[in-house]
Amino acid sequence: MHKLRQIFAFVAPYVKPYWGRIIAGIFFGILFGASNGLVLWATKTMLDRLVPPKAAAEATTAPETPGNWFSETASSIQSDLLATLDPWLPRMGDELTGMQIVGGLLVFPLLVGFRGSSKFLGAYCLAWASERVVNDLRVGVFQNLSRLSMPFFNRATTGDLITRINGDALLLQTCLASGVSILVSEPVAIVSIFTGLCLIDWQLTLSMLVLFPICVIPIVYFGKKARKATRKRVAANIDQSSLAVEMFSGMRVIKAFGLENTRVDRFRELSRQLIKQTMKTVRSREIVGPLVETVSMIGIGALILYVVHTARSMPDLVVFFTGLIMFYTPIRKLARMHVRIEEASVGAQRLMHVLDEKPDILEHPEPGPVTGFGDSIQFDAVSFAYEDEPVVIGLDLTIPKGRKLGIVGESGSGKSTLINLLFRFHDPDTGAVKLDGCDLRDLSIKGFRGEMALVSQEVVLFDLTVAENIALGQADCSREQVEAAARHAHAHEFIMALPDGYDTRIGERGVTLSGGQRQRLAIARAFVRDAPILVLDEATAALDSKAEAEVQTAIDRLAKNRTVLCVAHRLSTLRSMDRIIVLSRGRIIEEGSFDELLAKGEVFSGLAKAQGISA
């Protein structure tokens, strides 16, 4: 019950919009559960009326159990109800009337039709609601993930995130879709069947409950085993998903180093683990049913002995036999449902953890508006460390509006960290990054990021059309703006050569395009954004010389009349910069123009000579 309360408490906020359907589903579920007792009573009534008159007379002389308030009240209610239905029900030995023919033909079809329609309507309403609840939950998880800061994604694996959105939500969906219906209808069915059996023989019915605790033991035991196996299964599924993502994204390296068999062997091993844990879960779920059925058969054997010993009538035997099977059927369903709840609790806990995650980068409760960029960007005594490793140390830097700054340094010197701090992907440990004198932490995140455009070495394109990828740079931009941006980025010619021009889908990560083409689309996206601050992070580092020349021409055009921060490994791309800084271990060790730094003959000059550049 604790796990069930935990699951319902978790989904409660997502359930509120669909209360109407859920209440309707519960209502029809109650009707379906109650119909079981009604079918049992109708079966007993019809069988009693089918006993020949002589046998019925003999049955009435059989010893009766002592009367009590319950049996007398139940007998009175049955007598009144039978008196009302008597004209409609056929009886052995009586001449059939038109009403009895109609009643005999329709009594069971009507009951079964009522039972079936209430089951359908209950299951449909609850499934309708549960599908939407889980969909809203999945969207909520995705939305929360999109708000989290970069450190979270540096810690998490892609396989784990995909499993949480799809696999964990699916566990919960399976539980809610069928579970709510079962948890509503089956307890009502147990009560209604139990009541019907008590109306027939309350003492015998109560004696049958001796077997009930025996059914509970395997339900609890195998439920715990299923929960443990589900945790291990989810872990194996995460590892397998992560491996698949790594393989597909790094296929060139895998093929280049001949790692196909190694990766396949690892995938096969994870698949074996997944199968092992899945079968443990299936075993725990499926073994409960046979155990409950075996216990119920013990009850049926005892019932046969009791009927023979007391010389009860054949209708009593048939009704009790049917009733006992009907009584333990919902118990078996609830037992299987208990195992599913244990499985779903694992997924619910993992989803709770995602939804409880808070972004490291929080916006100010009352952020200042950003109406434009008018003065300068400042790094004021900024220090930053990844965990315990300092990356930027006491850095002071001012980039006036309209100036172009080049940033140089060996790997790990803090170049890209400056860019991350500027976009506020991270916050400095000490000091402040300022825009026009205002600390970024006091400004609207969307506002100051809207003043910047990023073109990086890692070009991110989506499985959309060319036009849609370019238009991501600015909401609601027109097709004319998209084409103008492509022309400025020197991308229009190759776009028009594509099968559907601007409407060509370029595949995941733009795999159908060359590196230079992808980079030019990224530049076109920056043109559409038309932001006053342009950030270039190794924008041409991965290109060959021909593609670099083409892209550099587009970048030069994009950089006109903008404030530029350009991180570059290829120093030749920095000739047009107004100022260049050289970083080492998070500190500025040199700064000046391109020619001034070459003439100094220090660190920058040494890096330039290594690339064949001399004063």
Image (spheres, helix red, strand yellow):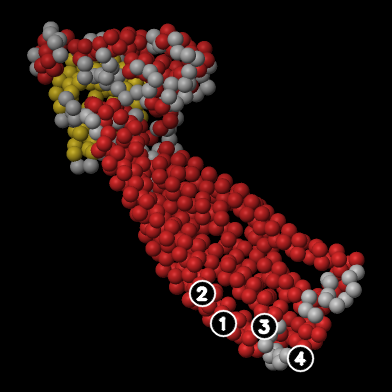
Query: In this orientation, which residue lies closer to the viewer: 615 or 37?
Result: 37
What is the distance, in whole Å, between disc 4 and disc 3 at their CAs? Answer: 16 Å
Q: Residues within 10 Å of mark 4 (few under 14, many from 20)?
A: few
- The reply to whether dot 4 and dot 3 touch (C-beta < 8 Å) is no
Q: Secondary structure at mark 4?
A: loop
The residue beneath circle 3 is 201
- Counting labels gives 4
Residue 580 placement: quadrant: top left
Query: In this orientation, which residue lies closer to the viewer: 579 or 541?
Result: 541
> Residue 399, can we see it?
no
Would you say 434 lies left or right of 30 here? Answer: left
Q: Quadrant of the C terminus?
A: top left
Of the two numbered discs 4 and 3 on the same chain, state the one appearing first in sequence: 4
Q: Which mark is residue 295?
A: 2
- Residue at 57% x, 71% y is 328
- Residue at 52% x, 12% y is 480
What is the distance, in whole Å, between disc 1 and disc 3 at their CAs? Answer: 15 Å
Q: Label 3 amino acid?
A: Asp
Residue found farthest to the left? 601
What is the distance, in whole Å, between disc 4 and disc 2 at their CAs? Answer: 34 Å
Q: Position of residue 567 (x, y in %)?
A: 25, 21
The residue beneath circle 1 is 302
Q: Secondary structure at mark 3?
A: helix
Q: Label 2 amino acid?
A: Val
Q: Position of residue 573 (x, y in %)?
A: 24, 13
Q: Residues within 10 Å of mark 2 (few under 14, many from 20)?
A: some
- The reply to whether dot 1 and dot 2 touch (C-beta < 8 Å) is no
Of the two numbered discs 1 and 2 on the same chain, state the one appearing first in sequence: 2
> Residue 178, can we see it?
yes
